[in-house]
Image (spheres, helix red, strand yellow):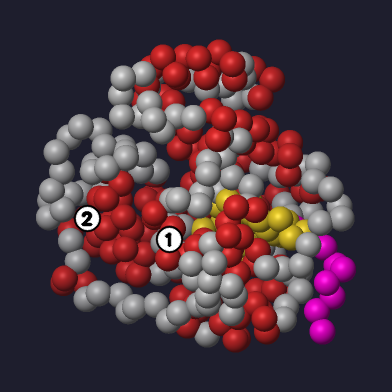
């Protein structure tokens, strides 16, 4: 029987396309638990989008004048397609900067459990903004084989770059190159970001962070979900293997932006359990940029995978 009175604090650092949103939904049903959705990653994109519009956000919350920022942003987007999307009343401005995220994670009430899921690249260059060692978060690294991740991510990136994140450059799916055409691509195609963060956590916060392969979890959740819960200090019951298909629980998650109508996560939001992932496509059927990314990142995955559950 799980000890429902024991609280925990877990922060999950993933790479894209690693079923992290599905995992967050699963863990949201832990008793007395508040879920957070990508505070560092969304701060990263906030930085990126604001910089592209001529706004440089400060590093520290004490230097952030949100009223002035909001007025300037409203003037900037007036008359553009973004005008209808920029609604300050719907944004959690306390999550705009990583500094504020850190302060909140360092001062959470002790009578509740917390699970935060994020992308590791959101913390790159901001390790001083991670929750302190004294905040007692257990760090979990959610890895995935590059040959499984990049074909899926390429499809998503092309959609993003031809819709909401378009730079105006015409793109064709056949010739799209995620190593060159994605203006927010991080060094090491995000895998190095995860690897570097893993090393930092091991050397400065916790010598034994949890490493789990998302495909192992999705393929055999009856084995790996209990392992994950035990390693991360979370209670486990078999009820976690299947959950409510309604997306309503998403409304309880802390997030900078409203999530419920985010089409990109519709499948995860309405999920009811884990499903065996599709196999990696044959290498000779992959696009050249996909192969390039796989070859450049396999070393980071392999070293971390040696420590996986």
Which residue: 81% across, 56% down? 112
Near-viewer residue (151 or 33)? 33
Residue closest to the eye, 112 or 20 = 112
Circle 1 Cα neighbour tier, 10 Å, few/some/many (<14 / 14–19 / ≥20): few
Q: Please tell me which residue lies in front, 212 or 42.
A: 42
Q: Does the magenta stretch include residue 3?
A: yes
Q: SS of the residue at dot 1?
A: helix
Quick check: can you spot residue 205? yes
Identify which residue is drawn at 52% across, 19% down: 70
Depicted 261 relative to depicted 87: above or below:
below
Is 180 left, or right, of 75 in this rendering? left
Q: Earlier in the sequence, mark 2 or mark 1?
A: 1
Tell me: residue 75, above or below residue 232: above
Figure quadrant of the N terminus:
bottom right
**Residue 131: assigned label:** none
Say which quarter of the image contains residue 99. top right
Residue 23 in picture, x, y percent from top left: 56, 67
Question: Given contact means CB atoms under 8 Å apart, are the residues at marks 2 and 1 in contact?
Answer: no
| Residue 266: numbered disc | 1
Of marks 2 and 1, the one in the foreground: 1
Position of 246 with respect to 233 (left or right) is left
| Viewport quadrant of the C terminus | bottom right
Distance CA(mark 2)–CA(mark 1):
27 Å
Residue 294 lies left or right of residue 219; in this view the side is left
Segment colored magenta: 1-9
Q: How many marks?
A: 2
**Dot 2 lies on which element?**
helix
Residue 50 included in the magenta stretch of the image: no
Q: Chief secondary structure of the magenta span? A: loop
Badge 2: few (under 14), some or many (20 or more) residues near its Cα, within 10 Å?
A: some
Residue under circle 2?
A: 289
């Amino acid at each position: 029987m799980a000890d429902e009175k024991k609280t925990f604090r877990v922060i999950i650092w993933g790479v894209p396309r690693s079923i992290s949103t599905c995992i967050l939904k699963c863990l949201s049903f832990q008793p007395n638990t508040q879920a957070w959705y990508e505070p560092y990653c969304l701060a990263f994109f906030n930085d990126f989008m604001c910089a592209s519009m001529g706004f440089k956000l400060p590093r520290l919350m004490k230097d952030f004048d949100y009223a002035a920022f909001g007025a300037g942003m409203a003037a900037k987007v007036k008359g553009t397609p973004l005008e209808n999307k920029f609604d300050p009343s719907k944004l959690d401005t306390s999550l705009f900067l990583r500094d504020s995220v850190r302060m909140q994670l360092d001062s959470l009430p002790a009578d509740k459990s917390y699970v935060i899921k994020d992308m590791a690249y959101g913390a790159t260059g901001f390790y001083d903004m991670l929750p302190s060692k004294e905040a007692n978060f257990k760090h979990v690294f959610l890895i995935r084989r590059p040959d499984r991740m990049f074909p899926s991510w390429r499809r998503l990136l092309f959609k993003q770059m031809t819709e909401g994140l378009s730079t105006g450059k015409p793109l064709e799916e056949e010739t799209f190159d995620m190593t060159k055409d994605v203006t927010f691509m991080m060094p090491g195609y995000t895998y190095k970001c995860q690897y570097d963060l893993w090393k930092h956590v091991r050397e400065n916060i916790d010598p034994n962070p949890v490493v789990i392969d998302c495909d192992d979890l999705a393929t055999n959740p009856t084995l790996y979900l209990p392992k994950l819960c035990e390693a991360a200090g979370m209670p486990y019951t078999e009820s976690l293997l299947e959950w409510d298909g309604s997306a309503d629980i998403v409304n309880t998650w802390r997030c900078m932006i409203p999530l419920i109508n985010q089409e990109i996560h519709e499948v995860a939001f309405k999920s009811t359990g884990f499903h065996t992932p599709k196999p990696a496509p044959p290498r000779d059927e992959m696009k050249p940029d996909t192969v390039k990314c796989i070859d450049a990142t396999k070393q980071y995955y392999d070293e971390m995978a040696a420590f996986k559950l």
